Image (spheres, grey):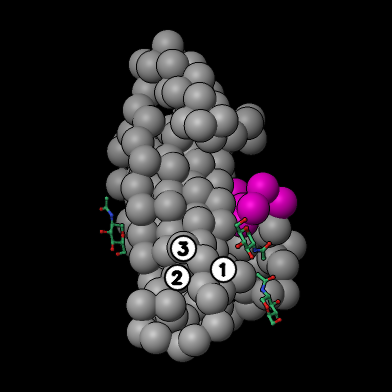
Amino acid sequence: MRTRCCCFCICVFAVLLNKACLQVTVEGEVGGSAVLPCSSIDNHLKKEDITVYWRHNSSQNVYDIIEGEGSVERQDSAYKNRAETFPIEYMKGNVSLKLSNLQFNDSGKYICYITKAHKNPSTQLFVKDRGNHGTATRAERIVSFLILLHILQYI
Ligand SMILES: *[C@@H]1O[C@H](CO)[C@@H](O)[C@H](O)[C@H]1NC(C)=O
Ligand SMILES: *[C@@H]1O[C@H](CO)[C@@H](O)[C@H](O)[C@H]1NC(C)=O
Ligand SMILES: *[C@@H]1O[C@H](CO)[C@@H](O)[C@H](O)[C@H]1NC(C)=O
């Protein structure tokens, strides 16, 4: 309920800025991969406009795109060689993240901050676990991602 309320507030904020807000659920299996969608509404971007911060559970650094260049310099070691974006898509505003070799603890909330000219947050992404209880049925091996996207661009 609290999450819903929070989402609502943020959506309202987004609408006020004449931007979009959407919520997506992505599922992946342990050992598999998932593409976490994130797009900027603005699809006529210049390279220097494309600065994006992907974060997991609010703080962990999954991936950065700095002025149109992918960067793993400050990446948390847990995502090493498991996170990729698609440079060919950047100019179209598509800064989706592919996460491979999924583990249970990859579940949770993902935030995709799209910044313009180094200002603040833009796109959010929540990943949630469906919960697993020991016995290894196939269903229990599914990692469930709940993705909440907020696109708030600061121009
Ligand atoms: C998930 O757990 C594994 C094994 O305990 C650990 O190596 C990895 O760093 C954790 N992943 C994250 C994202 O914290
Ligand atoms: C963004 O790029 C990824 C990887 O190529 C693709 O799977 C996805 O469909 C694209 N999303 C959009 C909105 O074009
Ligand atoms: C992130 O949060 C989710 C849901 O609270 C949790 O299941 C997951 O283990 C967390 N992962 C990390 C690496 O903090």
Characterize the local packing of mark 2: few (<14), some (14-19) or many (20 or more) Cα atoms within 10 angstroms: many
Cβ of mark 1 under 8 Å from ligand 1: the answer is: yes
Q: Secondary structure at mark 1?
A: helix
Amino acid type, residue under disc 3 in the picture: Arg
Q: Which residue is mark 3?
A: 130
**For discs 1 and 3, the disc positioned in front in the rendered view:** 3
In the image, what residue occupies the spot 72% across and 67% down?
Answer: 76
Which is more toward the observer, 27 or 90?
27
At 51% from the left and 66% from the top, the residue drawn is: 131
The percent position of residue 43, horizontal first and vertical second, equals 31, 38
Q: Are marks 3 and 2 in contact (CB under 8 Å)?
A: yes
Question: Tag 2: residue type?
Answer: Val
User: Given contact means CB atoms under 8 Å apart, are the residues at marks 1 and 2 in contact?
Assistant: yes
Closer to the chain start, of discs 1 and 3, is 1
Q: Is residue 86 visible?
A: no
Please report the bounds of the magenta region as a residue range.
53-59
